[in-house]
Image (cartoon, helix red, strand yellow):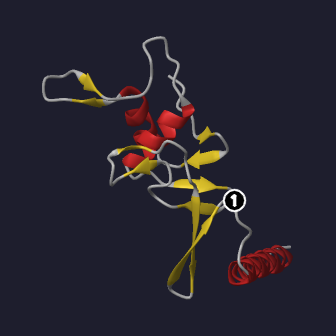
Amino acid sequence: MDIPNNVKGFELLNPEKVERALVGTVQRSGSLSGGVQAPDGTYDEDALLAEYDRMGGLIRKGEDKVKTGSFFDFKAKKPREKATPVLEFRINGRVQEVPMDEPLPPVVRAAKLAEESVKQEIEERAEEKAEKKASKNK
């Protein structure tokens, strides 16, 4: 069985939870319970996202984390009628939540730029170290 890791542009990072959301979980009796996959192997992508979200699986949109509960309503204990994906950003120890359909606030954009510049600097230093090590070994 092919386990999807990308559904409607959202990355599902835990393949075990994706499989349980698709086929269900084994009960004490040995039978399967739950699962959104039909006997013919088809499934509704919205139902899969909601079930995976209900299980607490990590969902990302690009490099950004999607808030748990964006696809499953835990208060009503059912999938949301209309999914409302919310992106979460941890900035200076605080969580900033931004609905996906809204532009990123300046503080989030600044933090993302800073993070990218730090990643680039780390990559450059690693390349320099590798070059020095290669020149020493010649």
Most distant residue in the bottom direction:
92
Residue 100 to residue 35: above or below: below
* Rendered location of residue 101, percent (x, y): 69, 59
Query: Observer-nearest residue: 123 or 30?
Result: 30
Residue at x 69%, y 84% (from the top left corner): 107
Most distant residue in the left direction:
29
- Circle 1 packing at 10 Å, graded few (<14), some (14-19), many (20+), is few
* Rendered location of residue 98, percent (x, y): 61, 69
61 left or right of 32 in image = right
Figure quadrant of the C terminus: bottom right
121 left or right of 60 in image = right
* Rendered location of residue 77, percent (x, y): 32, 46
Residue 49 to residue 95: above or below: above
Report the amino acid beneath label 1.
Asp
* Rendered location of residue 54, percent (x, y): 38, 47
Residue 90 to residue 71: above or below: below
Number of numbered callouts drawn? 1
SS for dot 1? loop
Quadrant hosting residue 78? top left
Most distant residue in the top direction:
40
Q: Which residue is mark 1?
A: 101
